[in-house]
Amino acid sequence: RARSAVRYSGVMTEVIQELKYRWGFWLIPDLVEILYRLIEAEFSDVHYDAVVPIPLHIARRRRRGYNQSALLARALAKRLQVAYAGSWAKQVKATPTQTHLTAEERMSNVSGAFEVCRVDRVRDRSLLLVDDVITTGATIVSCGKVLLEHQGGRLSIVSLASRMT
């Protein structure tokens, strides 16, 4: 199951861009509260063992200085009182930014981009995968598939915002 808290438009676009591109860390507590309320409303029947962020390739993380999804996931894990699983998956393929790509190009762009690093930790766990924005679903599907291949448990997906209709 996948859910987004809001549509990626208006003020939420500005808020997420502030976090993603301008070091808007001060927004994290409020954004995590939004995610927490989404989980309460949509996934109240699920207990998670760990929260996994969508990983950034190391080169992009170095350029940006941080992974906004990891910051959200770490704070959300603390709020949910479960493990933060920031090292359980990684992006192994450096991909160009997806900002101006079509849905088909995005899916091709992230194909084979992710792998599970901690198979022993992933197996038989209920995981919550976190991203900031779901545009076409390509990134979340690609990373989610890799986790599910090794997991055998349950995977839920949340994002702050979605561009999908």
Image: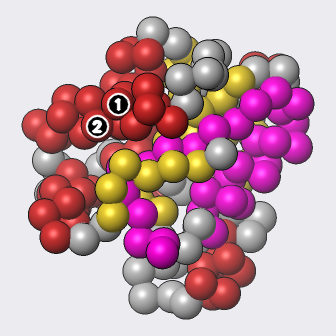
* Side of 113 where 101 appears, left or right: left
Q: Residues within 10 Å of mark 2 (few under 14, many from 20)?
A: some
In the rendered image of this protein, does residue 105 appear above or below residue 30?
A: below
Evaluate if marks 1 and 2 touch, with contact meaning CB atoms under 8 Å apart.
yes
Residue 126 placement: quadrant: top right
Residue at 63% x, 69% y: name it.
138
- Residue hosting label 1: 37
Secondary structure of residue under mark 1: helix
C-alpha span from label 1 to label 2: 5 Å
Q: Which mark is residue 113?
A: none
- Give x and y (percent) for residue 84: 51, 21
Q: Residues within 10 Å of mark 1 (few under 14, many from 20)?
A: some
Q: Is residue 119 visible?
A: no
Residue 17 placement: quadrant: bottom left
* Side of 81 where 8 appears, left or right: left
Colouring scheme applied when the structure was drawn? secondary structure
Q: Quadrant of the N terminus?
A: top right
In front of the other: 141 or 74: 141
Residue type at numbered disc 1:
Arg
Residue at 36% x, 17% y: name it.
79
- Give x and y (percent) for residue 63: 34, 60
Residue type at numbered disc 2:
Ile
Secondary structure of residue under mark 2: helix
* Side of 27 where 80 appears, left or right: right
In front of the other: 31 or 75: 31
Span of residues in magenta: 138-165
- Residue hosting label 2: 34
In the rendered image of this protein, does residue 125 appear above or below residue 107?
A: above
- Give x and y (percent) for residue 136: 55, 73
In the rendered image of this protein, does residue 163 appear above or below residue 116?
A: below
Q: Is residue 148 visible?
A: yes
